[in-house]
Image (spheres, grey):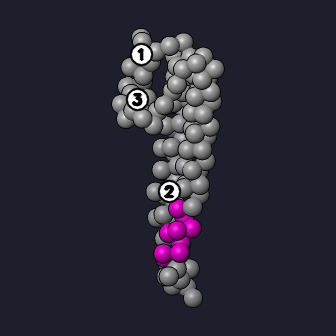
Amino acid sequence: MSAGELGFFIGVVPGAAYTLWNLIRAQHALEDARRTARAHGETLDMASSPWLRFYYLFKPAQFVCPQDGEGVRQAKMRLLAIRKSFIGRHALGDLLIAIGEFLGFAIGLGVGSGS
């Protein structure tokens, strides 16, 4: 592996770790929301419905449906409360990856050519 390639991968690590941390936080929030729905005897299953995930990300005003029970409504409201920060952190992680890959590659090339 060349120094440029090594630098590329080292540069990507911080952004990838930040993005992974954000996904783990979102998974914990989803589990909390599922527990809220279960406490009311209802089920919130985001994995079974691609439309539910789509509405969460792109059409949050349609995420909570009139036919939702009280538990599912509360669970969805909890998820909507973290939506902006989740998307913002994910975008920041992607930006860190993009910057890190170029900087890491450039630094790796500079270090590799100086040897």
Task: Name the side, left or right, on which 61 lies relative to 107.
Answer: left
Q: Residue furthest front?
A: 41
Closer mark to the observer between disc 2 and disc 1: 1
Q: Quadrant of residue 10?
A: bottom right
Q: Is residue 57 visible?
A: no
Q: From mark 2 to mark 1, how far is it between C-alphas?
A: 36 Å
Crowding at mark 1 (Cα within 10 Å: few <14, some 14-19, many 20+): few
Indicate the quadrant where residue 54 lies. Answer: top left
* Residue at the spot of label 3: 52
Q: Residue at x 53, y 75 (%)?
A: 6
The residue under label 2 is 97
x and y, in percent, of residue 92 in the image: 52, 45
**Secondary-structure class at tag 3:** helix
The x and y percentages for residue 22 are: 58, 44
Q: In the rendered structure, which disc, 1 or 3, sits on the residue that comes first in sequence?
A: 3
**Cα distance in 3D space between marks 1 and 3:** 10 Å
Q: Nearer the viewer, residue 35 or 112?
A: 35
Residue position marked by numbered label 1 in the rendering: 65
- Dominant secondary structure (helix, strand or loop) of the stretch shown in magenta: helix
- The question of residue 1 being in magenta is answered with no
Compared with 110, 52 (above or below) is above
Q: Residue at x 56, y 79 (%)?
A: 111
Closer mark to the observer between disc 2 and disc 3: 3
- The Cα atoms of the two marked residues, 2 and 3, are separated by 28 Å
**Quick one: label 2 or label 3, which is nearer the N terminus?**
3
Name the amino acid type tagged 2: Ile
The residue under label 1 is which amino acid type? Cys
Residue at left 53%, top 62%?
12
Image x and y of residue 112, in percent: 53, 83
Count neighbours of disc 2 (C-alpha within 10 A) and say few if under 14, some if 14 to 19, many if 20 or more.
many
Tell me which numbered mark, 2 or 1, is placed earlier along the sequence: 1
Magenta stretch bounds = 4-12
